[in-house]
Amino acid sequence: MAEQILILDFGSQYTQLIARRVRELNVYCEIHPYNKIPTLSDDIKGIILSGSPCSVRDEGSPDLDFGRLRGEIPILGICYGAQLMAQKYGGNVAPSEIREYGRANLSHLDMHSELFKEMTHGSQVWMSHGDTIKELPKGFDIIAGTPSVRIAAYKVQGEQTYGIQFHPEVTHSAEGKNLLRNYVVHICGCSQDWTSDVFIDATIEELKKTIGDDKVVMGLSGGVDSSVAATLIDRAIGENLTCVFVDNGLLRKNEYEEVLISYKDMGLNVIGVDAKQKFYTALKDISDPEGKRKAIGRTFIEVFDEEAHKIEGVRWLGQGTIYPDVIESVSVNGPSATIKSHHNVGGLPEFMKLKVVEPLKTLFKDGVREVGRALEIPENIIGRHPFPGPGLAIRILGDITPEKVATLQEVDHIFIQGLRESGLYDQVWQAGAILLPIQSVGVMGDERTYERVVALRAVSSVDGMTADWVHLPYEFLGKISNDIINKIKGVNRVVYDISSKPPATIEWE
């Protein structure tokens, strides 16, 4: 097992960002709930405690027994993690007299501390906390402060135990990456050897060992996740992998035919299955987003089960699950609420009798792309915008009908092709159109209309855990709006979504 940093999650919205920053240093890390700590081993080189939406002063707030951790392994507490350690050992945590949110500068900095090696006085950091540490326990030394926060960072005497009340993982902390590198590399002693090539070699070896001579059936979506996962499995077992690309009736315009051609060019053994009608039947009269996801998941399983029975000796189902899928699908005793279910997370029904293999389940989206490029997968697949597993079903608010799908496919096609032709596609992380369950008054010629409204969505992101809306040029949006309204019967209004994640999500459902 590779050396790693263990991140204990107290429910912060930034926990996944901590993991991404550590992995950017070519160091493997895992996120675990604060109340489900794995057995410590020599491979775990350090522990990072995340922030939390809770206050350490609240009854029932997340707690941790530091007895078996402190002094045994380096610890870095961030925000809530720092406050919890201070409070547990006799310090005083109280509500901030001035709420401490936003940019601040480290006016006091212990330059002899390993944590602040090569950092500068006045370094900008990002604060986000309603409580503050007023007094430290005995044996805890202040190593940084700001004009308004006397104790911005501390170190425990005789231990590699640190606490900071700011967030180094966010880009607003100008030297945050330096701080994390100091902790992970200099304090924890990690060797920074977790690269794409190492991941590929280790994963292929593990797949060979796990799967052996068994056969695998895998569903492909045309996206980067399933494409990279399939390529890894193919490198491990070759012709024993059969890929299934399902036309669920919820794909983009012409996507089924185009993706099949791309996969055959990559040398993958791919079977195309037209299952549109099965999915439309399963989705009939369902408007609830979770209901739609579950109906699609069940139907995928039925299709795969049917295809798997046609292949002798199939024992495994390959899936392109990635780390955010796992994180967003798991509720951790309160702090991390389930945001949405993912049809490729959570196992399979008993009747299917297939085991699941998920070679990408520890990677974020940016890591998947790096692996894909190392595998020399074509850039038109690697650079393709993410597309939700349930497809257009969660971009049609309300129930699903073939007519609604056809309308949205045309809208989406105009939008995406417009981005490509204008040279904007690669500046956007994900884009799409949403068919709203409302109609609006309009006028065409001398006639009053009462037709559909569509919303356009384009975001910038790295891994989908956070996202900002893209400031597309007004001229471009105006042209796309005119094209959609003039060319697509039944649509008379186009709006543009300017919400970021958080608080909104990228998809509307």
Image: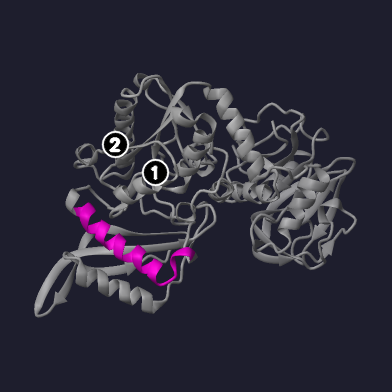
Q: Quadrant of residue 346?
A: top left
Q: Residue at x 59, y 48 (%)?
A: 374
Count of numbered badges drawn on the protein: 2
Image quarter of the N terminus: top right
Q: Nearer the viewer, mark 2 or mark 1?
A: 1
Tell me the amino acid under the disc marked 2: Ala
Question: Percent position (x, y) of residue 202?
Answer: 64, 34
Question: Percent position (x, y) of residue 220?
Answer: 39, 40
Instruction: Decide whether residue 413 is among the magenta residues.
Output: yes
Report the magenta residues as a range.
404-426
Judge whether residue 194 can be spotted in this image.
yes
For marks 2 and 1, the one nearer the N-term is 1
Residue 216, which numbered label? Answer: none
Type of secondary structure dominating the magenta stretch? helix
Question: Percent position (x, y) of residue 486?
Answer: 20, 72
Left or right position of 181 against 316? right
Instruction: Decide which of 365, 332 is in the foreground and name it.
Output: 365
Q: Residue at x 31, y 28 (%)?
A: 307
Instruction: Decide whether residue 23 is among the magenta residues.
Output: no
Instruction: Decide which of 296, 125 is in the foreground and name it.
Output: 296
Question: Would you name the residue on which mark 1 appears?
Answer: 264
Specify few, some or many for label 2: CA neighbours under 10 Å numbering under 14, 14-19, or 20 or more.
Answer: many
Tell me the amino acid under the disc marked 1: Lys
Instruction: Decide which of 451, 146 is in the foreground and name it.
Output: 451
Question: Percent position (x, y) of residue 71?
Answer: 83, 35
Extreme left residue here?
447
Q: Look at the picture and state if 45 lies above or below 446.
A: above
Q: Secondary structure at mark 1?
A: helix
Question: Would you name the residue on which mark 2 appears?
Answer: 295
Q: Secondary structure at mark 2?
A: helix
Q: CA distance from mark 2 to mark 1?
A: 29 Å
